[in-house]
Every structure is written in C-alpha cells, then in structure tokens.
Image (cartoon, rainbow, N blue to C red):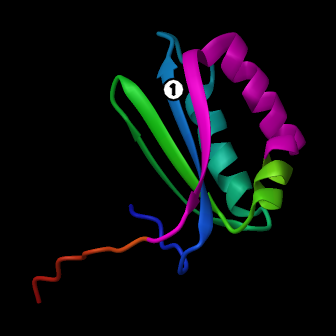
Amino acid sequence: MIAKTPQAPYYAVIFTSLRRERDFGYAETADKMVELASQQPGFLGIESAREELGITVSYWSDLESIRQWKAQLDHQLAQQLGRERWYSAFKTRIAKVERDYSFEFNDN
C-alpha cells in the first residue's frame, strides 16, 4: 500500500537491506516495529518491498521525531538484532521530501 503523506515538506527514512538466510524471528519483529512506529509522534506512514534487496521507507513530520524513533528502546533492540542476526548489510538514509505528486487509477 502507498502511504498517505501530507503536503511536503516532510522527511523520509530509507532503510535498504540484504537479509541473511535464516529468519531468527525477523518477521514477527518487523511487524512489531511497524506497529510501534505508527504509534510514535511524528510518524506519517510506511512503505516496504522485499525481493533480494529490501527497501523500507518510513515518513516522518520532522527530524526530532526520527531521532526519538531511533532512540526508542524496543527499536534499539531490533537494531541490535539486525546487526547480529538478520542483515548481511544495510544502509539508512534520511531525506527531506521537498515535493511529491501522485496518480491513482479509478476504473469506475
């Protein structure tokens, strides 16, 4: 599903990852992190896709909200487990969205 974001500007956290072979509880933790992030102040939405390369983009109202999410205790534990168990490589990028536009087909 495409996230419903407000009018720009806002921020995007782009998390790109390569997973290791075994799951080690990854799926359950990933679902928990999405649920937890959606309860954080400043959270606007999330989009995620995975084939070989996983890309998750979360949207935030401001940089302070992103800092608070990074420091959230359950999220810190998930970050540690990611380094120890789930990922062979990852990169996080934070970008300011200056503008966006969309298209939605409606066949009514």
Badge 1 local density, few (<14 within 10 Å), some, or many (20+)? many
* In the image: residue 79, left or right of residue 48: right
Q: Position of residue 31 (x, y in %)?
A: 60, 44
Q: Position of residue 41 (x, y in %)?
A: 80, 67
**Does the magenta-highlighted stretch encompass residue 76?**
yes
Identify whether 10 is placed above or below 72.
Answer: below
* In the image: residue 47, left or right of residue 11: left
Disc 1 element = strand
Which residue is at a point 51% across and 26% down the rendered structure image? 17
Q: Position of residue 39 (x, y in %)?
A: 75, 63
Q: Label 1, on which residue?
A: 17
**Does the magenta-highlighted stretch encompass residue 20?**
no
Magenta stretch bounds: 70-99
Q: Position of residue 84 (x, y in %)?
A: 71, 11
Give the amino acid at mark 1: Ser
State the count of labels.
Answer: 1
Write down the quadrant of residue 88 in the picture. Answer: top right
The C terminus, quarter of image:
bottom left
Identify whether 13 is placed above or below 20.
Answer: below
* In the image: residue 60, left or right of residue 12: right
